[in-house]
Amino acid sequence: MKFLVSFVTLLLSQQKAIEAFTAPVSLISKPTTTCIFAEGGDQQTRINFKHDLDSPKVATQDKLSRGDKKVYCRCWQSGTFPLCDGQHMKHNEATGDNVGPLIVSIPKAKPEEVVEESKVSAEDDKKIEGRKKRLVMGYKATTFAYFLSIIQVASKTGLTKFAAYFLSSRLLTAGVAYIMSSAAENDRLSSDTYKRLNLAMIGFGVIGLIVQALLPNTRTAMACIAAFLTMVNAVKGYGYGVLGWDKKKEDASIVKDLANYPVSVLKGVFSIPKNMKSFGYLGLTGMVVTMKVIKLVELVQVLKEGTDKVMIATRLSRFASLSFLAMVAYTLKDAADRDRLEGSTFIELNFLAALSLATMSAYVGFNSRLGGFAAFFSGFSAFNGLASIQKKQSKA
């Protein structure tokens, strides 16, 4: 009687699994489908005494393509579980039971279906190629727009220390945008490195537009265009990095990725440096983040005092620049931890960081504490960039 209760319980529990197989098979329009088995139970109704006994639930996933046929065990006695090996026949003879396997098959595609699927695949490939080309062009247009804005400002003000320091953030963004164009061409946008840089670009572009809105008298069309292109292309690049070029990546979620972003960054920042280079980049990150916090406090004070828009825009602009530089510094720290500084992206980031820090040191003065630190880390970044080039060439 106890076995009969167990068997009825098994049949009822398998009904959903049978429905899950039959519905996709009858409605399938793609060449693959997924089959999932799951069973569990307490000691009174236990039917599994053989497979994955340490697991709280036995779950097996399998995939079938067109023309495939598979026979799955439902007696839990098979030695090739989840596939059937005929053990149910011995079980039936011994117990008088009538349990049998689950047979799943997907018919072969008809010739017209093969043609249709090939057509859809070709259209998808064309669409993906178009998205990639547009994004690569967008990143390069961003780089070009920043160079034009730098030339425009420098031609009006001259290349003073202040102008060089002010424009270094635009040069940094132009360089990163160029790096991102290469990453898009080589399908590397899904890497955490490029997702972080895209998010940093989004922030810089958004704040850049706000700054331009606050400064109507000094606003330039090229600066507005550069900020807009930065924001738009970084949003697209980040989205493709998370969701894939076809925007159909399984289990991908922009919301989930954004929620994990600060956690992963904080975890990386507070992780113990794995080498001296990583320790140096951690120091650089700490210095820039400290400056960023100070600038944020100044911005809050200016907003409370209701000072004119020029003061607000100036503080906001420096906050955006320091935020971007902090992300570049952290990215280099992460690369050093992974011993990846020989990569082209990180070599270029090292030289861009060195240039930004050099202009900062020149502006605030080499003799000041901040200027001294900036000069040191500028040399540190430049040296690591050159060392990485030499090491990369020696491996070639």
Image: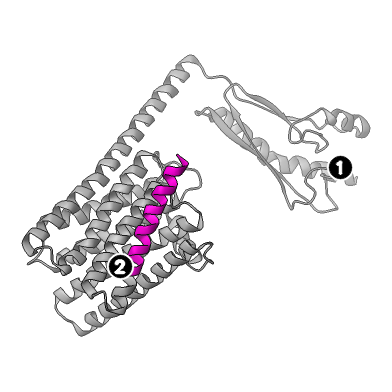
Q: Is residue 34 left or right of residue 8?
A: left
Residue 152 % position (x, y): 10, 56
Q: Earlier in the sequence, mark 2 or mark 1?
A: 1
The stretch in magenta equals: 375-396
In the displayed structure, 266 sits above or below 2; it is below
The one of 340 and 263 positioned closer to us in this rendering: 340
Q: Is residue 99 visible?
A: yes
Quadrant into which the N terminus falls:
top right
Q: Is residue 38 left or right of residue 207?
A: right
The residue under the point 28% across, 79% down is 368
Q: Is residue 154 left or right of residue 252?
A: left
Give the quadrant of residue 392. top left
Q: Are marks 2 and 1 in contact (CB under 8 Å)?
A: no
User: Identity of the amino acid at label 2?
Assistant: Leu
Residue 56 % position (x, y): 74, 53
Q: Residues within 10 Å of mark 1 (few under 14, many from 20)?
A: few
Q: Is residue 242 visible?
A: no
Q: Residues within 10 Å of mark 2 (few under 14, many from 20)?
A: many
The image's mark for residue 4 is 1
Q: Name the secondary structure under disc 2.
A: helix
The one of 337 and 327 positioned closer to us in this rendering: 337
Quadrant into which the C terminus falls:
top left
Give the residue number, with chain letter if any, for mark 2. 322
